[in-house]
Amino acid sequence: MTDYRPISCDLYSQYEVAVLHRTPLRVRWRDTDGVTHLEVLMPEDLETRDGEEFLVAHTANGDQRRLRLDRLLAIPGHEATVAS
């Protein structure tokens, strides 16, 4: 069983818009160890696996990220903006 906590439909829709418009997001996110990271990512897709939702994106260097949505701390739709 997963500890995934679903995000709101409104927030998910904002991520969808960021993917569709290829809007870079400055994202603060927590990894599985609880360490916080800060990166600018280009969103590519959203996917669901085993009841968890993910943002698939890449960095400016081309590294791919697959980040669980409940670990993201970003404001979608606002280019290069970070939530505090």
Image: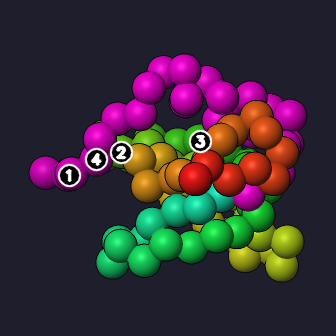
User: What label does residue 52 carry, if any?
Assistant: 2
Does residue 6 appear left or right of residue 81 in this picture?
A: left
Nearer-N-terminus badge (3/2) = 3
Could you tell me which secondary element the residue under label 2 belongs to?
Answer: strand
Contact between labelled residues 1 and 4, with CB atoms less than 8 Å apart: yes
Does residue 9 appear left or right of residue 83 in this picture?
A: left
Measure how far apart labels 3 and 1 are at the Cα level: 18 Å
Q: Which region is colored magenta? A: 1-26
Q: Is 73 a magenta residue?
A: no
Crowd rating for badge 4 (residues with CA inside 10 Å; few <14, some 14–19, many 20+)? some
The residue type indicated by label 1 comes to Thr
The residue type indicated by label 4 comes to Tyr
Q: Is 22 a magenta residue?
A: yes
Where does label 1 land, which residue? 2
Where does label 4 land, which residue? 4
Does residue 56 appear left or right of residue 41 in this picture?
A: left
Image coords of residue 47 (percent x, y): 52, 43
- Would residue 25 be visible to someone looking at this image? no
Where does label 3 land, which residue? 46
- Would residue 65 be visible to someone looking at this image? yes
- Depth check: give the residue in front, 61 or 29: 29
What's the residue at 65%, 41% (across, down)? 75
User: What label does residue 41 carry, if any?
Assistant: none
Image coords of residue 10 (percent x, y): 54, 20
